[in-house]
Amino acid sequence: MNDTTTQTATVDPNTVVLEAPLQRGEQQITSIHLRKPNAGELRGLKLQELLQMEVTSLATLLPRISTPTLTAADVNNLDPVDLVSVASVVAHFFLSKAQKEFLPA
């Protein structure tokens, strides 16, 4: 197995490596791991808005499911490319196994 294959095989699809790292005091956030939310973590949110990548809804949800824990201010400071990457991972959480089979590898 070559290095490219090894890197691909070990990449976590729920981790987003930021193109523009966030600076929080002395801490630099270079990647964000997201976990699938449970129903309680979706309280007060409209699923349709999350699927449409609505920034306000993402800013509410991401602090509940991210490691390191992002603040709403962190979400608002994300580079647009990184925001779309994070929102894509979130949208993927709402797909069934059957729907995921139709996605390109």
Image: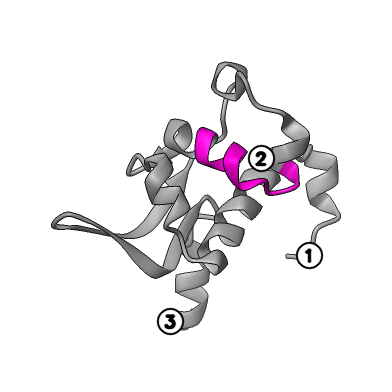
The alpha-carbon separation of the residues under discs 2 and 1 comes to: 16 Å
- The x and y percentages for residue 9 are 51, 65
Q: Amino acid under label 3? A: Asp
Question: Would residue 35 be visible to someone looking at this image?
Answer: no
The alpha-carbon separation of the residues under discs 1 and 3 comes to: 22 Å
Q: Quadrant of residue 17?
A: bottom left
Q: Which residue is mark 3?
A: 3
What's the magenta region?
A: 51-60
Magenta stretch holds residue 62: no
Magenta stretch holds residue 56: yes
Q: Is residue 79 above or below residue 47?
A: below
The alpha-carbon separation of the residues under discs 3 and 2 comes to: 29 Å
In terms of sequence position, does the residue under pointer 2 or pointer 1 come before the other? 2
Q: Residue at x 75, y 47 (%)?
A: 52
Q: Quadrant of residue 28?
A: bottom left
Picture disc at residue 93: 2
Q: Which residue is mark 1?
A: 104
**In screen coordinates, is 94 left or right of 2?**
right
